[in-house]
Image (tube, grey):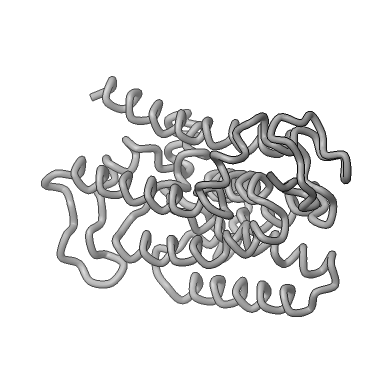
């Protein structure tokens, strides 16, 4: 197979690439199997698939409390009980109920049909672009960490003694928007770091559009967007996107993915136990 960092031919079980020095370029022997999932290792379709399944389960769990007939963003809205059951975040969940794990689970949940539709369209468009630039493990890390940063900021802001207009946080919040802003933050940093005015200006335009839309639309958690954007930008700076990808990036990406799904599972099990 080819080394994910430099493109040189390497053995599947080589301990390092003898051209660039990357550790475990064959991904511990799982490289060929992962490559069959596509250039993004299946992250984009898995993200869309898991988010869609969870949204459908939330609708079913809502029962008679489902809101099926509202227009726009109010179409097919799961009940707040269902949102909390599957791991929605926010000040109420994190500080009121002590459910800190919802910082990981909430990125995979959505509050309406248009909410998940638009978010997954953004994931489909942005994630492959960032993967091409910095690799799949670092993209996954940025996606998840940005979500955690967004929901942490949104959960903490309602407790702030000094209210900030337009960024007051939320008692209950969910969705992939914070992670999506994290991808844009990473792209913006990459454009600045690499000197690519095209990438920088395109990412900046998207960021401005999303924030303007957030201020104009009701029910949008702009605080989570801000936290996600800052988290994605900061993680890109920590990684240095122009440096070579490391083997431990894949390990961390897999750990974060596993932790996210454990958070969702625990939230459901914990919630059913309380019923």
Against 24, residue 119 (above or below) is below
Splitting the image into 4 quarters, where does residue 201 fall?
A: bottom right
Q: Give the residue furthest to the top.
A: 273
Q: Point out residue 11 in the picture as x, y percentages from the top left corner.
A: 73, 36
Can residue 11 be seen from the camera position used here? yes
Can residue 161 be seen from the camera position used here? no
| Quadrant including the C terminus | top left
Q: Give the residue displayed 76% in from the left and 63% down from the top.
A: 189
Q: Give the residue displayed 45% in from the left and 49% down from the top.
A: 47
- The answer to whether residue 27 is left or right of residue 214 is right
Q: Give the residue displayed 77% in from the left and 63% down from the top.
A: 190
Against 267, residue 188 (above or below) is below
Q: Point out residue 228 in the picture as x, y percentages from the top left corner.
A: 61, 54
Q: Nearer the viewer, residue 165 or 201?
A: 201
Against 67, residue 26 (above or below) is above
Q: Give the residue displayed 22% in from the left and 48% down from the top.
A: 59
Against 202, residue 156 (above or below) is above
């Amino acid at each position: 197979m080819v080394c994910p960092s430099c493109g040189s031919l390497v053995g599947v079980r080589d301990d390092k690439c003898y051209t660039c020095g990357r550790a475990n370029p064959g991904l511990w022997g799982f490289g060929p199997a992962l490559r069959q999932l596509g250039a993004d290792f299946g992250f984009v379709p898995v993200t869309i698939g898991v988010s869609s399944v969870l949204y459908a389960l939330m609708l079913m769990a809502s029962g008679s409390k489902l809101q099926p007939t509202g227009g726009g963003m109010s179409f097919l809205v799961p009940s707040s009980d269902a949102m909390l059951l599957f791991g929605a975040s926010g000040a109420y969940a994190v500080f009121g109920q002590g459910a800190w794990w919802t910082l990981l689970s909430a990125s995979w949940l959505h509050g309406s049909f248009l909410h998940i539709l638009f978010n997954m369209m953004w994931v489909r468009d942005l994630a492959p672009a960032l993967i091409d630039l910095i690799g799949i493990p670092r993209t996954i890390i940025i996606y998840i960490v940005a979500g955690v940063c967004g929901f942490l900021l949104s959960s903490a802001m309602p407790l702030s003694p000094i209210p900030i207009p337009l960024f007051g946080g939320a008692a209950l919040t969910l969705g992939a928007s914070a992670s999506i802003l994290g991808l844009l933050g990473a792209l913006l940093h990459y454009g600045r770091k690499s000197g690519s005015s095209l990438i920088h200006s395109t990412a900046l335009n998207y960021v401005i559009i999303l924030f303007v839309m957030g201020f104009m639309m009701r029910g949008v958690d702009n605080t989570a967007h801000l936290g996600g954007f800052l988290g994605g930008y900061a993680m890109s700076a920590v990684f240095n996107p122009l440096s070579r990808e490391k083997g431990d990036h894949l390990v961390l990406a897999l750990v974060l993915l596993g932790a996210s799904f454990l958070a969702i599972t625990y939230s459901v099990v914990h919630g059913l136990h309380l019923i």
